[in-house]
Structure formats: structure tokens, C-alpha cells
């Protein structure tokens, strides 16, 4: 009898990980998940006290984490950030924003705010990460936080959909560029997740009901629903997965 195959490791011991937009919500959960899998995690965001509190909580729980103030919309600051640090093995490209409104109400300032952060900043953060990875011969994983709205449309979501569909296209091209260097690139595409940013939306009962009608598993997502996918895509368990999207939507896009 052949030897039984062994499940590839989900552990990330000895690896370095960066999470942007890590002060709260999905970003903080991603950082916690990577630390719980053994990675040394850098939490990056503009607000110092949030990431410092997050890093302290991870360290108190037995993980390894540090905070780094970074405005990802400042491309010069992004370049300096990566130039001053050794390469990361995992990037969770999570910083983003949303301004829900009908198409006809969108101003140029609204457009710039959403597309600049969700697309331009994500692009140059990924570029900064992979430059150091390639230079140091580090193989690893880019994980871009997309959305189910990068696969479907939605009312009052023209800007957000535009940005998240762009992330999906960028991701596929990244994967092709990076494959020869042993660097994988994928997206996670969540449904509506209850976070400090989205919680006010769910106070509108009509909106909440409309969301639940489309999530076939019958509940709003939680940040914990994304922690396993983050670790999976960062680990050797997903070693042959690149250029695709892991849709965590409770069945929304299956309909």
C-alpha cells in the first residue's frame, strides 16, 4: 500500500504577514487569524490607537504582532514602508471604503475617494510588497479583500462595484505576472459582513431584510467567517490556487 498523503500545513510559523486596514472589523480579524496560525503580523492603518490596541490584544493572546501607522493612499509612504522592512510572506490587502448612493448622486469627489483607495492604493501596496518579495526571493501569497459585489451588481453600489470588479481583474493579471516567482494572488469576496462600518446599515430593517433574502444560508456574515479563508489562502494548503476568487457569500451569487 502507498503511504497515505499528508494534508499540507495550515500553519504559518516563522512567516511574516502584513494586513492593511487592520484597526478593526475584517482587517483585525484577518490579523488575528494569521497570528493564531503562527505568523508574525504587522497591523497597518492610519489610526495609531486602533492598530496598537489590536496588536496588544494579539500579543496578550500569545501571538506575535506589531503596529505600523501607514496611509496607503500616500504612495510615497507606501514605498518607504516596504523599503524599510524585510519582505512579507503574506499580504492581506484589506484597506477600503464605500459610499453607497444612486449613480446620479455620485460626485467626482465620491468617485475619487472610493476608486483611489479601493483600487489605486491596493495596486501600489501589492506592488510594494512584491518588489521586496522578488528581490529577496521570498515566495508567498497576496490576498486582496474583494466583495461579492466584484461578481454581481447592486443598487446604490456603482462605485463599490466598479472598484471590486477592478480588483478581480487586477488579481488575475497579478497572478500571471507573479507565478514565475512563486507568489500567488487571490481574492476573498465576502457577502455583507457585520462590522463597525456596516452595522449602521443593518439598523434599517428593510435593508437588512433585503440582504437576508439573498443570503441563502439565512444570516449576515461575521468576521469569523473570513478568518479560515484568510489562513487557507496564506498557507501551503492552497499551494496550487492562484488568480481566482474565494466567494464567501452564503449563496448570494449562486442564484
Image (tube, rainbow, N blue to C red):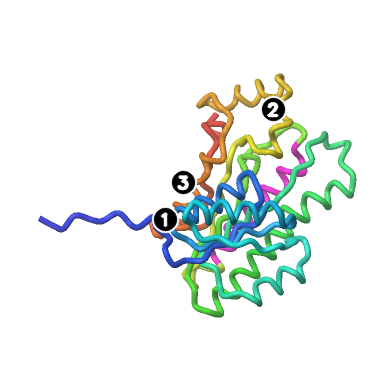
> Is-magenta flag for residue 75?
no
Among the 4 quarters of the image, the one containing residue 55: bottom right
Marks 2/3: CA distance?
A: 24 Å
Upstream in sequence: badge 2 or badge 3: 2
Upstream in sequence: badge 1 or badge 2: 2
Marks 1/2: CA distance?
A: 34 Å
Tag 2's secondary structure? helix
Q: Residue furthest bottom?
A: 135
Binning the other alpha carbons within 10 Å of mark 2 as few (below 14), some (14 to 19) or many (20 upward) gives some
Q: Which mark is residue 228?
A: 3
Q: Quadrant of the N terminus?
A: bottom left
Q: Position of residue 163 (x, y in %)?
A: 71, 49
Q: Which mark is residue 238?
A: 1
> Residue at point 70% right, 34% down?
154
Tag 3's secondary structure? helix
From the viewer's perspective, is residue 204 above or below residue 106? Answer: above
Q: 88 or 60, which is in the foreground? A: 60
Q: Which residues are magenta?
A: 157-176
Among the 4 quarters of the image, the one containing residue 174: bottom right
Q: Which residue is mark 2?
A: 202
Amino acid at each position: 500500500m502507498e503511504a497515505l498523503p499528508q494534508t499540507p500545513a495550515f500553519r504559518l510559523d516563522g512567516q511574516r504577514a502584513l494586513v492593511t486596514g487592520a484597526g478593526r472589523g475584517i482587517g483585525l480579524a484577518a490579523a488575528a487569524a494569521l497570528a493564531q496560525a503562527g505568523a508574525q503580523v504587522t497591523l497597518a492603518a492610519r489610526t495609531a490607537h486602533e492598530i496598537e490596541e489590536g496588536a496588544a490584544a494579539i500579543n496578550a493572546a500569545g501571538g506575535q504582532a506589531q503596529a505600523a501607522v501607514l496611509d496607503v493612499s500616500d504612495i510615497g509612504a507606501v514605498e518607504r514602508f516596504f523599503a524599510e522592512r524585510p519582505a512579507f510572506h503574506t499580504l492581506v490587502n484589506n484597506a477600503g471604503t464605500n459610499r453607497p448612493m444612486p449613480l446620479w448622486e455620485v460626485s467626482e469627489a465620491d468617485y475619487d475617494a472610493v476608486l483611489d483607495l479601493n483600487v489605486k492604493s491596493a495596486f501600489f501596496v501589492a506592488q510594494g510588497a512584491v518588489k521586496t518579495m522578488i528581490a529577496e526571493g521570498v515566495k508567498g501569497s497576496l490576498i486582496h479583500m474583494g466583495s461579492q459585489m466584484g461578481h454581481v451588481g447592486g443598487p446604490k453600489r456603482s462605485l463599490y462595484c466598479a472598484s471590486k470588479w477592478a480588483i478581480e481583474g487586477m488579481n488575475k493579471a497579478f497572478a500571471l505576472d507573479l507565478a514565475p516567482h512563486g507568489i500567488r494572488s487571490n481574492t476573498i469576496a465576502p457577502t455583507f459582513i457585520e462590522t463597525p462600518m456596516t452595522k449602521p446599515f443593518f439598523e434599517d430593517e428593510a435593508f437588512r431584510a433585503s440582504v437576508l433574502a439573498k443570503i441563502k444560508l439565512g444570516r449576515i456574515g461575521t468576521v469569523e467567517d473570513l478568518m479560515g479563508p484568510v489562513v487557507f489562502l496564506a498557507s501551503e494548503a492552497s499551494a496550487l490556487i492562484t488568480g481566482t476568487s474565494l466567494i464567501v457569500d452564503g449563496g448570494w451569487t449562486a442564484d
